Image (spheres, rainbow, N blue to C red):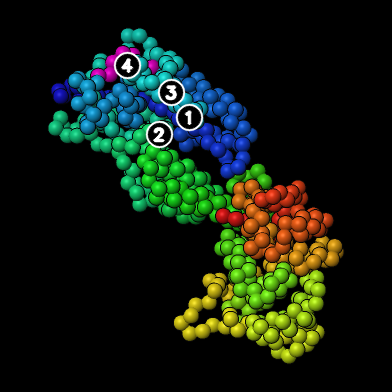
Amino acid sequence: MTEATARELDERVLGRRWTVRLDAAARGSAAVRVSCSRSSCAEQRLPSAAAGRAAAIAHLKEHLKAVPVPRADAYCACKAEGCTAHLRPDDRSARAEPWRCGGPVVLAVVCDREGRWWRAVECCSRCAAATPGARVVTTAPPGTTPAPRAATPTDGLRFSDDSAAGGAQEVPAPRPATGRPRPRHGRIAQRIVPTGLRPLALRDELIELGDLFRAYQQRAEPDLAVLAGLQERKARAFTTWAEVTGDARLRLDAQRAEQAAATARLQHQQRTGRAVDGDETAVVRLLTVPAQWEHARSVLAHAADHAPLPGAEARLVTLLLTLRTALTGAGNVVGQDLTGLGLTDAEQLLEQLAGRGWLGLPGTAADLLAARPENPGRITVPSLVPRQDVPGPFTFGKATRPKLSGWAQRVTSDKKLRKVKASAETRLLALTLATQTDADGRLGPLGQGVGLEVLAAWCPVSPGELRVLVEELARAEWLADATVTDTHLTGRLTERVLPLSCPLP
């Protein structure tokens, strides 16, 4: 390469490029978000995909209006993307002659067939013609077309999208003729993004996400709203990556990213009182973090598996006394804790639990039921007393146990449940359903309902009895829009009791 040719390449500037994307705003919602690769462009949220597409197209048109004429001295932006016209080194055997750019510089628009992204690039007319689906919007004035040139070792470099803001970047001087083009590569989540990964948009998204995660780790203060957005993008990108490569481990990583995004959103709501999108007020829950919600479910499951007597009344008392004695096997109880549960015969039930050896009483069952807050009864549950080298059934600590116990007592002694004189079965069902909702209070994973088999395992009632209990919860303003089918219970918790819910991951 002559010195004059190298000087000419150094004087050229990278072609401008803008990418507008359309993504789902949240799982289970029709809302979408429109984002632009230009960092100065604010994200938009629209109620439907149709409105999102219209907004995305309008946004791209604004960029094109702001730059009505392409620059004649621009260096093809598509080369930094490895377009089909510019061959990679390992693909040169597929074409007898190297690709040569040529013709006037144009502004071309390329869009995804499924309407998920739109891209405008500044490139030569030959590259635009060789790009499938590209549509030329405008062409540089005649008489200013740069001379054609062969592909150079700078073709693999990545350039900033912000060059359109006026800070156009010069193309670096080429490497010696014997050098190899530098491939575009990156890392994300301890994984190397393959340079040959296709489609190119997926490769670019993974590389950009890796850079963004590393930048987030360098922040002085965390921003959970930003983190939730990054995790959502990672989940989508890894799902696509898994589909392209067939790697099941990537799909597991995508699921973990979805859970991390949900956790970050909920933590953001608890800390700020606002949802991530800022459009709704967050629910302030009695149990504030996802770890506590999982602990609540673990205690319910333990009570279901270790209740010494059959029936919902025994299950409910077993659950509440387990929460009082969870870590040491001993705890304080007053009579009001048990007499307000709608039990048929609380004294007989306590005597039966003691007779089975599951419960240790300080005196008689009648003495415990008569205990007052100033002089509580001290009970023991031998199966929960710590033993050497034998870990207990629960992983939460001393600070969490009273929070879980207070949550269960708050649910079972709810004033509306007391007003309708709810039975122990109804109160146990209320506890169970509080742990089987999504973040919006809809029953079941993603609001699709709770399977009757799941309810039967945690709340031992028949389908016929379940319908009666659901009606009782509706009268107590616990459930709304509740329907019992042959397989599921659907509906949602009311706004009144939503703070008592423990959303599913």
Counting other residues with Cα less than 10 Å from the Cα at mark 2, is it few (<14), some (14-19), or many (20 or more)?
Answer: few
**Circle nearer the N terminus (2, 4):** 4
Residue 396 percent location from the top left of the image? 55, 71
Quarter of the image for the C terminus: give it. Answer: bottom right
Mark 3 = which residue?
110
Magenta region includes residue 102:
yes
**Circle nearer the N terminus (1, 2):** 1
**Circle nearer the N terminus (4, 1):** 1
* Contact check, label 1 and label 2, Cβ < 8 Å: yes
> Looking at the magenta stretch, what is its main secondary structure?
loop
What distance separates the C-alpha of mark 2 from that of mark 3? 12 Å
Checking the image for residue 148, the label placed there is none
Residue at 21%, 27% in the rendered image: 92
Amino acid identity at mark 3: Val
Mark 4 = which residue?
126
In this rendered view, identify the residue nearer to me: 202 or 420: 420
What distance separates the C-alpha of mark 3 from that of mark 4? 15 Å
In this rendered view, identify the residue nearer to me: 257 or 167: 257
In the rendered image of this protein, does residue 202 appear above or below residue 304?
above
Residue 51 percent location from the top left of the image? 61, 28
What distance separates the C-alpha of mark 4 from that of mark 1? 23 Å
What distance separates the C-alpha of mark 1 from that of mark 2? 10 Å
Among all residues in the image, which is located at the extreme bottom?
363
The stretch of residues the image draws in magenta is 100-106
Residue at 33%, 27% in the rendered image: 83
Residue 117 percent location from the top left of the image? 48, 29
Counting other residues with Cα less than 10 Å from the Cα at mark 3, is it few (<14), some (14-19), or many (20 or more)?
Answer: some
Mark 2 = which residue?
201
Amino acid identity at mark 2: Ala
